[in-house]
Image (spheres, rainbow, N blue to C red):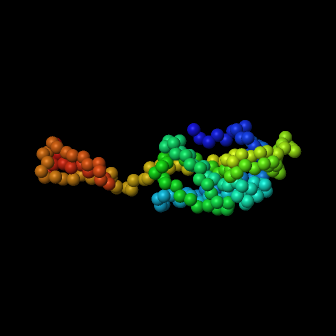
Amino acid sequence: MRFSRQTGAYPCPVLKEELDECAYSNGKFAFTLDIDTSKSPNTLEIKSELQQPEIESLIKNQDANLALGVHCDKTYYYDLVDLSNKPSHSITLDEQQVFGNVYFFLVVKAKRAISNFSPSGLDSVFNGMSFNVRCGDLLAISNEVVFNYGLPPLPVGESIFELVLQQERHSSEFAVDLGREKIEIAVGDRLN
């Protein structure tokens, strides 16, 4: 099960990328993700954009931090990686932990309890309200970015099998060795 992005699931107003499902009437929280799959582990370059002064101030004062959520349904891999308070980040992901669609999302979460939080730009239904934010509560959440991790392509003309000729084997015998880079099939000098 993936991270729930329901509007009513949060104890305080959450800034989301789509303002129509957000407690804020203005502000912005988004990110871009570039994945370098040419080396192992993969390198993830993350650039965030936050336009909400009170949340920005919480991050600057280290009362809140950015974190990247990574989730894979097929392998049940889930991680929430804490990031620095800068807008650009570079982290690694062991691609052997994931397969198929992998979902990435960025959040801002409280690092400690915050009393009487009353951010600007809230929808008018929140006028005059302040919130007691608990440690770990989400203050902002981005849209998901989906990346598909498939099996690496097999080079043209490349086989996963290797046929090994063994003179001492009877023509009706063969042996399979799975403990090598390629599946080794040993056969006698004739195949019947």
**On the rendered image, what quadrant is the N terminus found in?**
top right
**On the rendered image, what quadrant is the C terminus found in?**
top left
Farthest residue, direction right: 128
* Residue at 43% in and 53% down: 153
Q: Is residue 111 left or right of residue 104?
A: right
* Residue at 15% in and 42% down: 172
* Number of numbered tags placed on the structure image: 0
* Residue at 58% in and 47% down: 103
Q: Is residue 69 left or right of residue 170?
A: right
Q: Is residue 166 left or right of residue 28?
A: left
Q: Nearer the viewer, residue 17 or 85?
A: 85
Residue 183 in the image, given as x and y percentages of width and height: 29, 50
Q: Nearer the viewer, residue 189 or 88?
A: 88
Residue 110 in the image, given as x and y percentages of width and height: 70, 50
Residue 23 appears in view:
yes
Q: Is residue 53 left or right of residue 46?
A: right
Please tell me in which quadrant of the rendered image residue 123 appears.
top right
Please tell me in which quadrant of the rendered image residue 31 appears.
bottom right
* Residue at 16% in and 52% down: 166
Residue 145 in the image, given as x and y percentages of width and height: 61, 49
Residue 22 appears in view:
no
Residue 78 in the image, given as x and y percentages of width and height: 55, 46
Q: Nearer the viewer, residue 104 or 68?
A: 68
